[in-house]
Image (cartoon, grey):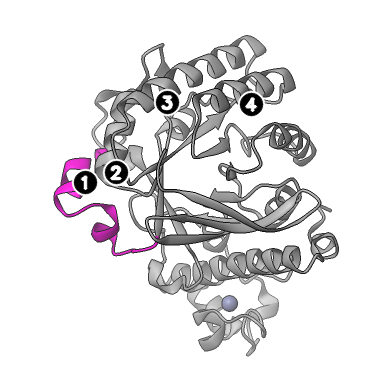
Amino acid sequence: MSNLNFKILAKEDKSRTGEITINNKTIKTPGFMPVATRGAIKSTPHTFLDNTDVLLANTYHLYLRPGVDVINELGGIHKFMSWDKVILTDSGGFQAWSLPTKIDNEGVVFKNIYDGSSFKMTPEISIKSQNKIGSDIAMIFDCLIDIKDSKEKQINSINLTRDWGSITKSFHKNKDQALFGIVQGGLHKDLRELSTKYMVDQEYDGYALGGLAIGETNIERKNIVKFTSELLPDEKPKYVMGLGDMHGLVDLIEEGIDLFDCVWPARLARHGKLIVGNTYINIKNKQYENDPEPISNVCTCFTCQNYSKAFLRHLIHNENTTAWLYLTIHNLIQTEIILDEARKSILESTFSTFRKQFEYE
Ligand SMILES: [Zn+2]
């Protein structure tokens, strides 16, 4: 067990707000982690994210470039990327799903996306890499498969995740690093229950629900998260991996989820779609050609403080690369603001009212 502490400050029904502290740093929960894949968020310097407490970096990508020894020799990931708040590293399990791979009992054979060569990621290599990278929170190497894969394959996935979790634990040697388990099992309640039992028996600092936000409907996701969240120990952080749209976040905060990560707000911005209140506008639309107003009059982000919709539309139409930066900042700050309002509403016991603004249509 690490020096991670989780304190719940208030609850409203199942939703809760609290603080995760680790290595003298704090994550306000529910919290959202922007994804800094290779140590940097696409298109946005992380210095713009004043209220973000935690970033997620990808072990698979850092393992290949610049290599975990390079990061270790440079003083660890915080120093390397100049971010002194919390960093969580994923284990490489997600890339086993998103990239072409071959899974066997020992691990996952990946194709190196940079030179085409093959290499095998195992639970041992993944956790040793995360130990060296020096993130505050590491994840076990899990077996993530498609949500629509057969039940037989889902059974294999939870069994491998159990076995790989136990190997991960035996090689986890960084005392300053918390370790989270991952519950798999697709949309099968009996398998989620079994996988939760495997993980809780192994005792982790927090528990993630994996294998979601990859093609299931919102209702299917809600139901399986509701079911699984109730089985997880309430005194530990609960984290849904790979989810970041504002309606989805609020929907699962309602089920007691404390942490989320996703590339979604940044990717959405690169397509010109911007969060305004509980909806979006497309800045590419002609109606903004002469619009002197900022994206949002109430937004505190750098972009809204400085630029009009007309100027931002002009940049994106001319493929000026600063457009991606300005638009991404806005969507990430808006996501921060929504989480901030959600936390505040739980403290004030008004979450059930706040929640209504973010119903799926
Ligand atoms: Zn803004």
Tag 1 residue: 66
Check contact, mark 4 vs mark 1: CB within 8 A.
no
Q: In the rendered image, which residue does mark 2 sit on?
A: 62
Whole-Å distance between the Cαs marked 2 and 1? Answer: 6 Å
Side of 251 relative to 108 (left or right): right
Residue 331 vertical position relative to residue 172 in the rendered view, above or below: below
Q: CA distance from mark 1 to mark 3?
A: 21 Å
Q: What span is in magenta?
A: 63-85
- SS for callout 3: loop
| Front position in the image: 117 or 139 | 139
Q: Nearer the viewer, residue 248 or 83?
A: 83
In front: mark 1 or mark 3?
1
Which residue has dot 3 on it? Answer: 100
Looking at the image, residue 252 sits to the left or right of residue 274; the answer is right
Quadrant for residue 201, please give it: top right
* The label number, if any, that marks residue 147 in the structure image: 4
Image quadrant occupied by the N terminus: top left
Report the front residue among 361 and 82: 82
Who's the residue at 61% across and 47% down the image?
Answer: 243
